[in-house]
Image: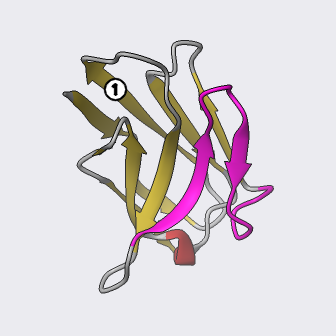
Amino acid sequence: QVQLVESGGGLVRTGESLTLSCTASGRIVRVAALGWYRQFPGKEREWVADVSSRGEAMYANFVKGRFTVSADNAQTTIYLQMNDLKPEDSAVYYCRGYNQWGQGTQVTVSS
């Protein structure tokens, strides 16, 4: 089984940046897509961005231009560089991959 561990969340001010990372470990048989989701209180998780198994990045419309997703060549670590953060970006961010979810990391953006 694969485990995903996220890091990099925290409290920042409007306009500042954060970089999240997520590392997969365990029995990885073949490369798979890795992605980021976020969840607001009382809401379902929403897709933010992902990197396909071929290294192609895709983004939700609401973050395009502000966030950059990337992964290492082995597709075991995924990053989410978030720039120009807004209070409405405040959420718990989850990593998803290899049929697993990470534990989530809180991002809070103060106004």
Secondary structure of the residue carrying tag 1 is strand
Quarter where residue 48 is shown: bottom right
- Residue 67 in the image: state x and y as whole percent: 68, 51
Q: How is the image coloured?
A: secondary structure
- Residue 40 in the image: state x and y as whole percent: 39, 77
Circle 1: residue type: Ala
Near-viewer residue (48 or 18)? 48
Image side of residue 24 versus residue 56, left or right: left
Quarter where residue 89 is shown: bottom right
Mark 1 lies on residue: 24
Q: Is residue 60 magenta?
A: yes
- Residue 33 in the image: state x and y as whole percent: 53, 35
10 Å crowding of disc 1: few (<14), some (14-19), many (20+): many
Q: Is residue 107 visible?
A: yes
Near-viewer residue (28 or 61)? 28
Considering every residue shown, the one lying at the far left of the view is 1
Considering every residue shown, the one lying at the far front of the view is 29
Tell me the residue at 71%/40% (across/down): 57
Considering every residue shown, the one lying at the far right of the view is 65
Image side of residue 28 versus residue 37, left or right: left
Tell me the residue at 28%/45% (across/down): 102
Q: Is residue 111 visible?
A: no
Q: Is residue 49 magenta?
A: yes
In the depicted structure, whether residue 14 falls above or below residue 32: below
In the depicted structure, whether residue 28 falls above or below residue 50: above
- Magenta segment range? 45-65
Near-viewer residue (56 or 81)? 56
- Residue 69 in the image: state x and y as whole percent: 64, 40
Q: Quadrant location of the C terminus?
A: bottom right
Image side of residue 5 versus residue 65, left or right: left
Q: Quadrant location of the N terminus?
A: top left
